[in-house]
Image (tube, rainbow, N blue to C red):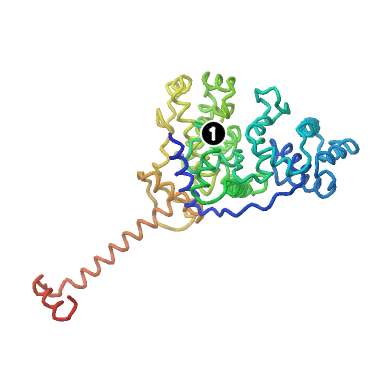
């Protein structure tokens, strides 16, 4: 699919959720803090693990704002004290980064920013860079290399990390089809269409997705809310949730799924994200099971976000096209799963929402409706924003439409006894009254 189409999707989604895109704050011109930030953020939560340590380094070691000052602190205090971090890998990467930047004659923040303006220099940071003059520092991928540019406040900088990818998925973009640089280009072009800097759009997306993750983090929620957040669970947690709801036979069938050989080969070839494809397919099987079995609370709120769930369902759909998936279907024929495809996301089961079931009301009926994909996406967004289920919104819309029809019928009945007026007589009356 052309990148221009994906850009349009992203721009439309930003408008639909009314994403605020403020200007990023000016950069902190502390080179030591920037390097520490870039090193520690790999695989760690920024707000809880990285941010506080970066702030501590900035406050306690003002002399480390230059490379020479940072090198002096390393020699006198050590990497462990400087980072407040026990990990040997991070400590070694800090030393090697300082050595590399010294070799590149980088001293101040302005030197680093100017050095990063070159795409060649940016690529030299990559661990797998084929150049002889590469940095040779472990665990630096595209996201980390671009994060240096974000920290240096380069206007076109975009770091395509897991949060940005989740946002793109929610916008309806299949991130698996594109390489890292293509995803970065989509965000950059969308920023141009929105009249803002890519750097600012990147920050707005990151803040938005971080709020979403924090709002559904299971460990800080009571049990009922944890159940509402099961969309973010891994395959093992999802199977346990299914067992707890009495679906032991279904779980046994899901556990019979085999990891496709083609997916294993993709992982061996280094295809991004391929390691989790099989786990996502199993998770998708549980999600479809919960939906078709009408587990209380499904669908409800942001269980991982609409795009997150859609990705798992799509992965299940892909699994069932593999040889292993076809064999699994033919062997077990799960009654809760239509052979050949997962339940279409825009084929919505109309059922009562969890909050309505405890209220005395007329018995509800299950039906299936088909929505235009764009209308369905807008409906899901409204459900998230209003904290209501899709079923509630559809029921209300139908009630309003029927209520309008009832008012029209009542008006017709009230005027049924009025005399009929011909068209000619009506025109003459309007002309006499000066209306025409």
Quarter residue 50 falls in: top right
**Total labels drawn:** 1
State which quarter of the image contains the C terminus: bottom left
- Using the rendered image of the protein, determine whether residue 216 is visible from the camera's viewpoint: no
State which quarter of the image contains the N terminus: top left
Residue drawn at 72 percent across, 26 percent down: 136
Q: Is residue 355 above or below residue 328?
A: below
| Secondary element type, mark 1 | helix
Instruction: Decide if residue 435 is on the left or right side of residue 326.
Output: left
Of 162 and 112, the residue lying toward us: 112
Q: Is residue 127 above or below residue 311?
A: above
Label 1: few (<14), some (14–19) or many (≥20) C-alpha neighbours in 10 Å:
many
Quarter residue 132 falls in: top right
The residue most toward the right is: 76
Q: Position of residue 144 (x, y in %)?
A: 67, 36
Instruction: Decide if residue 264 is on the left or right side of residue 370.
Output: right
Q: Position of residue 217 (x, y in %)?
A: 64, 45
Residue drawn at 66 percent across, 35 percent down: 145
Q: Position of residue 27 (x, y in %)?
A: 70, 49
Of 92 and 354, the residue lying toward us: 92
Residue drawn at 40 percent across, 44 percent down: 348
Q: Position of residue 409 (x, y in %)?
A: 24, 65
Q: Which residue is mark 1?
A: 283
- Using the rendered image of the protein, determine whether residue 342 is visible from the camera's viewpoint: yes
Residue drawn at 80 percent across, 42 percent down: 66
Of 110 and 232, the residue lying toward us: 110
């Amino acid at each position: 699919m052309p990148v221009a189409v994906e850009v349009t999707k992203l721009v439309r989604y930003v408008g639909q959720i009314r994403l605020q895109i403020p200007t990023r704050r000016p950069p902190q011109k502390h080179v030591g803090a920037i390097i520490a930030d870039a090193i520690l953020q790999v695989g760690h939560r920024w707000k809880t693990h990285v941010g506080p340590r970066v702030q501590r380094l900035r406050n306690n070691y003002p002399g480390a704002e230059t490379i020479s000052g940072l090198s002096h602190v390393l020699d006198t205090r050590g990497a462990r004290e400087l980072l407040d971090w026990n990990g040997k890998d991070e400590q070694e990467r800090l030393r090697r980064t300082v050595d590399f930047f010294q070799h590149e004659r980088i001293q101040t923040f302005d030197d680093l920013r100017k050095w990063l303006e070159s795409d060649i220099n940016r690529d030299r940071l990559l661990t797998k860079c084929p150049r002889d003059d590469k940095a040779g520092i472990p665990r630096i991928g595209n996201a980390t290399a671009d994060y240096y540019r974000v920290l240096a406040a380069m206007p076109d900088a975009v770091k395509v990390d897991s949060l940005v990818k989740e946002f793109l998925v929610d916008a309806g973009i299949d991130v698996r089809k594109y390489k890292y640089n293509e995803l970065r280009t989509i965000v950059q072009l969308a920023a141009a269409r929105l009249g803002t800097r890519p750097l600012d759009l990147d920050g707005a997306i990151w803040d938005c997705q971080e709020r979403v993750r924090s709002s559904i983090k299971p460990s800080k929620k009571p049990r009922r809310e944890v159940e509402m957040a099961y969309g973010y669970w891994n395959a093992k947690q999802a199977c346990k949730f299914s067992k707890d709801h009495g679906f032991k036979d279904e779980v046994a069938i899901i556990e019979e799924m085999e990891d496709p050989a083609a997916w294993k080969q993709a992982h061996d070839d280094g295809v991004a994200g391929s390691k989790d494809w099989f786990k996502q397919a199993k998770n998708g099987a549980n999600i479809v099971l919960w939906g078709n079995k009408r587990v209380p609370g499904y669908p409800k709120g942001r269980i991982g976000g609409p795009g997150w769930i859609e990705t798992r369902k799509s992965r299940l759909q892909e699994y069932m096209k593999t040889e292993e998936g076809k064999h699994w279907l033919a062997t077990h024929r799960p009654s809760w799963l239509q052979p050949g495809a997962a339940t279409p996301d825009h084929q919505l089961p109309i059922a009562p929402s969890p909050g309505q079931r405890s209220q005395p009301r007329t018995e509800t009926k299950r039906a299936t409706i088909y929505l235009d994909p764009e209308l369905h996406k807008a409906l899901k967004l409204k459900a998230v924003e209003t904290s209501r289920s899709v079923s509630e919104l559809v029921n209300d819309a139908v009630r309003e439409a029927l209520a309008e029809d009832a008012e029209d019928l009542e008006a017709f009945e009230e005027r049924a006894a009025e005399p009929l007026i011909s068209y000619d007589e009506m025109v003459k009356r309007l002309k006499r009254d000066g209306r025409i």
